[in-house]
Amino acid sequence: MAVRRPRRGAAAPPGPSARSCRWQCRLFGGRAGAAMGRAAPLLLLLVAAVAGRAGASAAGGPEVHSLRGSWRLGNGNGSVVLRGEVPGCVHTALHRRGLIQDPYYRFNDVMYRWISLDNWTYSRTFKPPFDVRKWQKVNLVFEGVDTVAQILINNITLGRTDNMFNRYEQCSFSWDWGPSFPTQGIWKDVRIETYNHYNLIYFSLTSFFVKSAWQWSLEIESIFDVVGSKPIEGLVTVNIPKLQTQQTFSVKLQPGEGSIVLLVNINKSSTVEAWWPNGHGKQTGYNMTTTFIMESGYQIEKFSKAYFRTVELVQEPVPGSPGLSFYFRINGRPIFIKGSNWIPADSFQDRVTYDILWLLLKSAADANMNALRVWGGGVYEQDEFYDICDELGIMIWQDFMFACALYPTDQNYLESVRAEVFHQVRRLKSHPSIILWSGNNENEAAIASNWFSIPYADREVYIKDYVTLYVKNIREIVLTEDKSRPFIASSPTNGLESVKEGWLSQNPYDTHYGDTHFYDYSNDCWNWTVYPKTRFASEYGFQSWPSFSTIEKVSSTEDWSYTSNFSLHRQHHENGNDQMLQQIGHHFKLPQSTDPVKKFKDTIYLTQVMQAQCIKTETEFYRFSQSEIIKGEGHTMGALYWQLNDIWQAPSWASLEYGGKWKLLHYFAQNFFAPLLPVAYEDKGVLYIYGVSDLHVDHKMTLRVVVHAWSSLEPVCTLAKDSVTVKAQSAVPIYKESINDLLERCRNCTRKSCVITFCLVGEGGLQSPTNHHFLSSLKDAVGLENTHLSASVSQQDDIYVFVLQTTAIAPFVSLDVGSIKGRFSDNGFLMTEKKKVVVFYPWEPTSVEELEESLTLTSLVDIV
């Protein structure tokens, strides 16, 4: 079995990796909570005038004064001074002021390395809008400092930071899909908060279903900073009107970090609607108000949303197979996980807006995904990311930010990590979308496979460090802080078998346990037998180039060649460009145009076709393997391809380009992740079709199989198999025939001259996408003719309708409207009928004229 090496790109620097936290520091004494390191140091210099208006009375509520906005920013020797926005970073400040170009343009990732190698100072003068003497506690709060920084106010050092993940980015030093931009700055909010008596720091709620009582309950945890030296007593009232649930509790807060844990039982007479993943039900949430009324203090009201769902990671014996299952049960129902892996949406996190997150995550949901894995080499995403996932029903496999590296376990480092994990779990555990905590990305495999050439004599030391960091620290905190969802130490892992082997298994890629990562760029991707019949595929993929309109924005004319310096520079995966051509060459003719720009565009198109067809083949293999065990392998219950989104404009494994444009792969994903899908594969000359369903009930359907000759739009023959039972949440064989018999029955057909399409049709409009099975490589196809493809465009309300017409069968028809933002209802399809209607959903205002002018229609026969 071929297993990929870790994605490395430019290697991370030696020593501690870049990590982060909610950074709190008291103005008057006390500790400075903080964060780990990279790039040159940052200096945050604040000058506060003493004067200020009188604060609220001692019994009044806390006051908050934001320090976001315009700061003075300067480099180490003072040669560069400018205005810098907070939240923000040095790169975006320089770009906004016109002092540098777009950092993503051409070779600027190299040209602008000086920025990360210089020291930078953010400074500002402000007047406190209150009299600090009136308050028992005054906090200066940095939500995100990137990263190694010293913070001074009126020339007094308040604290130092060295871990951005108490909020931060490891991938900032480059990866094989991204550039190196080690950013520096204040990348989240800054504020001064003042209060007397007590202040709410963390508030979380997690739901449980108590089977013995047949009742839902909520665990509400509130963590306070209690200022005085004595306990504070009071009342807490929780009210969920829609569930006719209201409870009042007498509570006592201890001095320091006081916490309250409340268990609220939901009124049994109310019907609770559970939160379900996308495609399996609604994402119902209930408005909840929690009111704290404490003695001699002020009232705090917390408005939140309560969701009800249970999650189990099922690892139990599988009949007919060694090993254990590895699948998720949500609200008691086994769910096949369909989705991808998420990386940071930009090298400069202050550019990642709510709208960008919504666009990317909605695109995932629109492609029938129900899950994403937040990969452990990026960032813990902002609150809005998880809010959107809650709303869209996208389950999150959440890695902690450790990836493909060996990490230290000295006391200072462990304390930093523990602060980080406490913070992130407390911040995120209320989200029903998060279904799993995972300790790291590929570090169990890294030690097991000895990626870092550790001498055998030292191996036990590294194993001990691994267990110390991920088990005795991270796992211990997670299990203490959050009992509502499972934890695994690594991905890939053998799950309970890894635990049994001392948390580090001999072969973490064992298909009989846990999850696997699998990459193979040399074997033919159409050959399903090369793929592991795994319990859960959490990483797999193939590269492609983004569309020309995306590349054009960051390049110049001389770059528009597959072998240009620009193309080589943008490819951060070793031999990546050649691997794409090699994979294309298995089944397609390589472009030979004498026009270099056309040849470049043709190559881009073919990389996207190849990527889409490869990942389609592999994903469909995982989906049809869910209900069967063959030679002890199978029962596959998850497919998360690498990767969903791009961090810049470059070749990568992504299905969404930087900016959100859908590659052909994403359109294919919409079909291969469809809730109802017929999947075909060939074995020893026999064609098998499986009925794959995520639906909750069985359906009697008709399987329609159509055989076309490449040379004609008229079908050679059709077959309708009625009363096919497609079982709920299963993959079952529904058709079997030898290819020779099929071709003989369809007369005048050979493997090279014909193609098979098929779909499932049921009652009430229930229908699957139309799928296809190629009988030969398309470079060997006989009868493919040059076709005249045309399209007419019309507007209907806020969507646009494209009516396509063809004079011959057209494989992989691609509609491209350049830089106009939006997506089509279908793309990259096999056009076997004279006419096809495709809808365009714009993401910004456009017009029929703009769309007609920008439209490019391409099919395989246009590649010369």
Image (cartoon, rainbow, N blue to C red):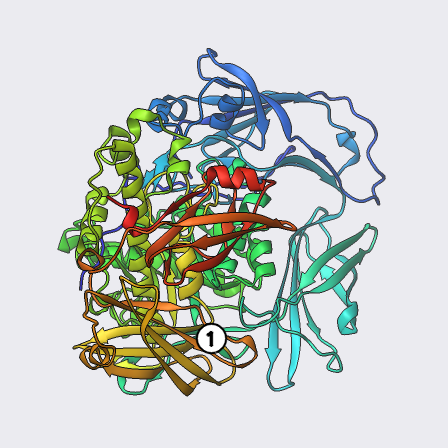
On the image, the x and y values in percent for residue 840 come to: 53, 51
In this orientation, which residue lies closer to the viewer: 542 or 42? 542
In this orientation, which residue lies closer to the viewer: 232 or 676? 676
On the image, the x and y values in percent for residue 715 come to: 33, 71
Q: Is residue 5 left or right of residue 713?
A: left
* Residue 371 visible in rendering: yes
Identify the residue at horizontal 26%, vertical 37% (top origin). 599
Q: Is residue 375 left or right of residue 454?
A: right
Q: Secondary structure at mark 1?
A: loop
On the image, the x and y values in percent for residue 157 come to: 55, 27
Screen quadrant of the C terminus: top left
On the image, the x and y values in percent for residue 391 come to: 61, 59
Tag 1: Cα neighbours inside 10 Å, few (<14), some, or many (≥20)?
Answer: many
In this orientation, which residue lies closer to the viewer: 270 or 31? 270
Q: Quadrant of residue 105?
A: top left
The residue to which callout 1 is attached is: 694
Q: Is residue 168 above or below residue 595?
A: below
Amino acid of disc 1:
Asp
Q: Is residue 472 left or right of residue 739?
A: right
Q: Quadrant of residue 112?
A: top left
* Residue 438 visible in rendering: no
Q: Residue furthest top?
A: 79
Q: Is residue 99 left or right of residue 443?
A: right
In this orientation, which residue lies closer to the viewer: 249 or 622? 622
Numbered marks: total: 1
Q: Is residue 810 above or below residue 413?
A: below
Screen quadrant of the N terminus: bottom left
